Image (tube, rainbow, N blue to C red):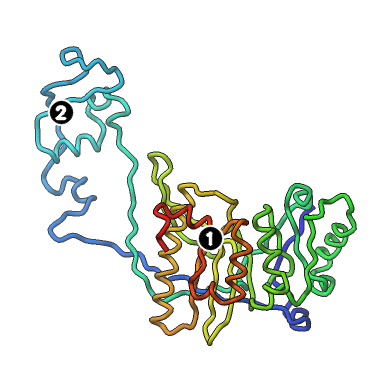
């Protein structure tokens, strides 16, 4: 059995002073093609429009063959005679019997694509467009949590209302599986919110505490994919990887005529993996670009990003309450670990 989160019904939400939607911005980006003066196109060169053709290889020496032994049976090199471009075309076509005899060492490699982009005007993103999130009720027995308000009976569709009532009545579920929140402190546009791990659950508990909720205008828990994507690149062993992720939380705090959007990626304590280091580096650049464009276009929003783990939650919300967070004075324990020099802010 599953049930879904969705946007709060606008009529019922307004009756109970709930948030209807929140708007954010992404940096506008445009792909560009680069051309070099005096250079032929790849497809023209491969079509031999330059007058250079692949030719059979003329071998001078073969190392690790019968005559020039190296003692290492795992590789072989050869010296060939001829024009560089002729040789490269011969290798590219992979038809010469000598190349095939050398096995995988000379096989054509996969191509690497490099995207060159320029920043355009910011693109709006609204929580109205966020996809529904589903969870199997059985997951509530294994660390998942459902958050809902004390006025859920006026906000949920009948199916979800019935499922939630069954969950509330189930005495065998862990205490952490269900959290009822005061309607005035549940400042999100969603009718119910799911978490699947303890760091996320504890963060929402902090968001909904009275002393913190009073300082927050609204917040949203993002989806795992598709809502607000940030690109990053990192190397896993010898293999470069291009990936995307969605930060976990967006918190809106309005001060002095500006909407400060605090973006939080939540991880377990001490999760200082190479991938997270890359995420932090690329995401800081993402929001630096976005803030520059917002200022240029006179949009009164500013984005602040933090990597956060439970051992910094208390300090994070202390800084949120007294204003030091939006002044850029906070730094988490995990960020110190992820920044290799410990000083890159």
**Residue located at (68% from left, 64% from top):** 204
Front-most of residues 247 and 307:
307
Front-most of residues 293 and 344:
344
Q: Where is 322 relative to 337, above or below?
A: below
Mark 2 crowdedness (10 Å alpha carbons): few <14, some 14-19, many ≥20:
some
Residue 198 position within the rendered picture, expressed as x and y whole percent measured from the top left: 68, 53
**Which residue is disc 1 drawn over?**
332
Residue 86 position within the rendered picture, expressed as x and y whole percent measured from the top left: 14, 38
Distance from Cα at disc 1 to Cα at disc 2: 60 Å
Q: Which label's residue is closer to the chain start, 1 or 2? A: 2
**Which residue is disc 2 drawn over?**
57
Indicate left or right for 121 with 46 as reference.
Answer: right
Residue 116 position within the rendered picture, expressed as x and y whole percent measured from the top left: 32, 61
Q: Secondary structure at mark 1?
A: loop
Front-most of residues 251 and 80:
251
Of all residues, the one furthest to the bottom in this rendering is 257
**Residue located at (49% from left, 70% from top):** 329
Point out the frontmost of discs 1 and 2: 1
Of all residues, the one furthest to the top in this rendering is 66
* 1 and 2 marks in contact (CB < 8 Å): no
Image quarter for residue 208? bottom right
Indicate left or right for 159 with 340 as reference.
Answer: right
For the C terminus, which image quadrant? bottom left
**What's the mark number on residue 206?**
none
Q: Where is 269 relative to 149, above or below?
A: above
Front-most of residues 311 and 308:
311
Mark 1 crowdedness (10 Å alpha carbons): few <14, some 14-19, many ≥20:
some
Indicate left or right for 227 with 60 as reference.
Answer: right
Q: Secondary structure at mark 2?
A: loop
């Amino acid at each position: 059995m599953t049930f879904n989160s969705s946007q709060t019904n606008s009529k019922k939400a307004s009756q109970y002073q709930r948030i209807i939607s929140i708007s954010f911005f992404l940096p506008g980006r445009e792909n560009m093609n680069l051309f070099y003066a005096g250079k032929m196109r790849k497809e023209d060169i491969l079509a031999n429009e330059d007058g250079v053709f692949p030719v059979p290889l003329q071998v001078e020496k073969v190392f690790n063959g019968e005559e020039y032994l190296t003692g290492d049976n795992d590789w072989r090199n050869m010296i060939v005679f001829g024009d560089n471009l002729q040789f490269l075309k011969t290798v590219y076509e992979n038809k010469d019997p000598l190349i095939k005899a050398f096995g995988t060492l000379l096989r054509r490699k996969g191509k690497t694509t490099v995207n060159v982009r320029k920043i355009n005007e910011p693109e709006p993103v609204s929580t109205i467009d966020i996809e529904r999130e589903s969870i199997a009720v059985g997951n509530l027995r294994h660390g998942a949590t459902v958050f809902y308000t004390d006025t859920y009976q006026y906000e949920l569709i009948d199916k979800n209302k019935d499922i939630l009532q069954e969950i509330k009545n189930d005495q065998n579920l862990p205490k952490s599986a269900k959290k009822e929140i005061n309607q005035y402190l549940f400042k999100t546009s969603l009718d119910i919110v799911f978490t699947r791990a303890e760091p996320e659950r504890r963060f929402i508990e902090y968001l909904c505490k009275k002393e913190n909720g009073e300082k927050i205008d609204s917040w949203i828990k993002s989806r795992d994919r598709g809502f607000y994507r940030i690109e990053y690149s990192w190397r896993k062993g010898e293999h470069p990887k291009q990936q995307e992720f969605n930060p976990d939380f967006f918190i809106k705090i309005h001060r002095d005529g500006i909407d400060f959007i605090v973006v939080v990626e939540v991880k377990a304590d001490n999760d200082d993996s190479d991938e997270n280091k890359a995420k932090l580096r690329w995401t800081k650049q993402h929001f630096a670009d976005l803030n520059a464009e917002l200022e240029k276009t006179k949009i009164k929003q500013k984005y602040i990003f933090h990597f956060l783990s439970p051992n910094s939650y208390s300090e994070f919300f202390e800084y949120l309450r007294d204003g030091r967070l939006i002044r850029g004075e906070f730094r988490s324990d995990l960020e110190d670990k992820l920044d290799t020099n410990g000083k890159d802010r």
